[in-house]
Image (cartoon, rainbow, N blue to C red):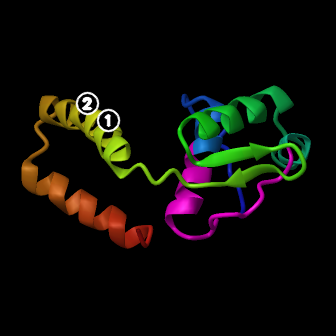
Amino acid sequence: MVIEIDFNSDEAIYVQLMNQIILGIATSRLQEGDTLPSVRQMADTIGINMHTVNKAYTLLKQEGFVSIDRRRGAVVAIDVDKIKALEEMKQNLVVALAKGCCKAVSRQEVHQLIDEIFDDYDL
């Protein structure tokens, strides 16, 4: 999996890294049981600080996307708690939809956007 970080983005690097790993899982480029590169390897490959990678991996663990194994490192381990995942998604969507409403984005445009995302990312 290729990780691309936009160093000019306002989004924190650890958030970009987390989002790309989550997208990799969602699009099946990363599977349950796959091992992520070590913190040092990932940092060297991307050209970022090891603490940044460690923060991303720690948050991915807290959110149930990876487990940390002393021997294998960070391993994709998807949390199957669907109700919790749906509630978290709902909270995030409420804010995103409210922002869209403030910019006069219609319900139809939101539905089109969601369909486009599912199609573009093969979700």
Q: Amino acid at mark 2?
A: Val
User: Residue 17: x and y, percent?
Assistant: 65, 43
The dominant secondary structure in magenta is loop
The structure residue drawn at horizontal position 86% and vertical position 53%, both measured from the top left corner, is 72
- Residue 122 located left or right of residue 25: left
Query: To which quarter of the image does residue 16 belong?
Result: top right
The structure residue drawn at horizontal position 49% and vertical position 62%, both measured from the top left corner, is 26
Find numbered disc 2 in the image and state the secondary structure of the residue it sits on.
helix
Q: Nearer the viewer, residue 57 or 49?
A: 57
Cα–Cα gap, marks 1 and 2: 6 Å
Q: Is residue 32 magenta?
A: yes
Question: Do labels 1 and 2 touch, CB within 8 Å?
Answer: yes
Q: Is residue 94 magenta?
A: no
From the image, tell me which residue sits under label 2: 95
> What is the crowding at mark 2: few (fewer than 14 residues within 10 Å), some, or many (at least 20)?
few
From the image, tell me which residue sits under label 1: 92
Magenta region, residue range: 19-38
User: Residue 19: x and y, percent?
Assistant: 55, 46
Q: Amino acid at mark 1?
A: Asn
| Residue 8 appears in view | no
